[in-house]
Amino acid sequence: MKYYCLLFTLFLFSCGQRSKEHKMVFRYNQPEGIPTLDPAFAKNQAIMWAVRQLYNTLVEPDSMLNIRPSLATRWEVSEDRRRYRFYLRNDVYFHDNDIFPGGKGRKMTAADVAYSLKRIMDPGTASPGAWIFNGTVDPATGFQAIDDTTFQLTLIQPFHPIMGILSMQYCSVIPHEAVEKYGKDFRKHPCGTGPFKFHYWDEGQALILHKYENYFEKDSAGTRLPYLDAVKVVFVDSKATEFLLFRQGELDFINDIETSFKDEVLTKQGHLKKEWEGKIALIKAPYLNTEYFGIVMDPEKRDPSLKDIRVRQAINYGFDRVKMMTYLRNSIGIPATSGFVPAGLPSFDTTHVKGYTYDLAKCRQLLKEAGYPEGKGLPPIKLVTQPVYADLANYLANQLQEVGMTIQVEVIQKSTLIDQAAKSAIPFFRASWIADYPDAESYLAMFYSKNPAPPNYTRYNNPVFDQLYEKAMLETNDSLRYKLYQEMDQMVIKDACVVPLFYDISVRFRQMNVTGLSSNGLNLLELRRVKIE
């Protein structure tokens, strides 16, 4: 009762009564919470979704993952592919805020772009996204405002994925005044140019964003976006409770569904059951996300039992991914029987990258060759996961028991898991990687030895891989670059520093009166064209 009273109070406080004022308020839940609204720290989906409503980037991906203009109207690339000159819109203003004279939002300029991107690389910022320009841009000379509407990016050497990187939420444009006034507290005092402006945030309870009346984008009929009056985010940590709130009409949309409700709502083939048709809408789309178990390769921090490549390969052969997806995921996702790079990217090719399929005979053979026939003599291996993925970890453990391997599953909270994995404190861990931009490099960067964690959580270090990676980054021919990507992907799979589980599919449920909610392979939350009838 207390929870519902709180929600009702916040709703009245922030948005008014929908029944009386007919306000369009889009309501969704973020179970893991939102730790910051500073785009320099947009390292996970929860932060990205909120930040995307408040800020803009130079360019952005469309529904087909093609890069299109946003703050920039067009761009030119030099012949040597090292200089990118962006021509900016001249009608973009930051949200009204006390940081500006008279509280009136000023015009966004190229100097703001240069400041924002340079800030990501500044050690004083300590952004987890600093790696995106690692070895690619010199912070002293790479970001330059030619004039108010012209920004130039200079690369140390050609780097094909750079346009995708510039579309990441890390690269959102912010005003320097906000950081200068609030410092680290900028995380809870956001100010951007996005379709929604900050209104209220009670951490752990609710976040309220209001429509930005002077947002620069318009629809094809000339109507200024967004259509919604407000966005309300609540933080209910139980996915089960989230689904119940959705069923009761308290939420307009949910992303994915709690495991215990999957069989009630979806068939084993992943379709909406007949009794739910016409009551809620199911939206499924390819999602550039690979779910996996990671294995730390650093000799000083790895599990001694996982030192032998044959043991790691045996784990990969020892469980049935197809059955796992059918019975535990209701066919939401594609079994990861190819490489680490997921389906949906142009370089994905199952004929060139061969992964692991269920093969107990091969699993037993590898264990025997490693000196552990039928698992004898092999110490128990601890696998650390988070609550929502405990069923997958237990499935793996149960199947590997058939060959004598003992996997001890430990369940900890997601935040602790991420923190410990970044420190290589967990030798065998559950993880996922969502593409930051639509290019396989976003996945392969995870195994480049010069990258820290994130993204190189496994501490993979292979000089041959590094050479291929660096060669691929200089390659301008797509076909040749894709071949290098495939060669690297196969190398990672062979070395078995990861246990790929599945390539994801985004599953969203919306209320029937919600329209305009689109999706793409990055599973971004796009609300500019959403309406509530």
Image (cartoon, rainbow, N blue to C red):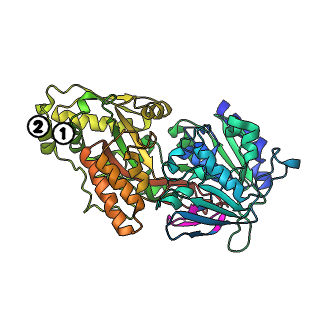
Quadrant assignment for the N terminus: top right
Counting residues from the start of the chain, the first of labels 1 and 2 encountered is 1
Q: Amino acid at mark 2?
A: Glu
Outermost bottom residue: 221
Instruction: Give the residues drawn in magenta, as a range.
Output: 60-73
Query: In this rendering, is residue 386 above or below 248?
Result: above
Query: Answer yes or no: do the residues labelled 1 and 2 have beta carbons within 8 Å?
Result: yes
Is 33 drawn above or below residue 169 in the view shown?
A: above
Residue type at tag 1 = Arg
Residue 225, position in %: x, y? Answer: 71, 63
Q: Which residue is mark 2?
A: 369
Q: Nearer the viewer, residue 492 or 146?
A: 146
Q: Position of residue 150 (x, y in %)?
A: 68, 64
* Callout 2: SS: helix
CA neighbours of label 2 inside 10 A, class few (<14), some (14 to 19), many (20+): few
Which residue in the structure is indicated by mark 1? 310
**Residue 311 figure quarter:** top left
- Image coordinates of residue 133 in percent, x first then y, are 52, 50
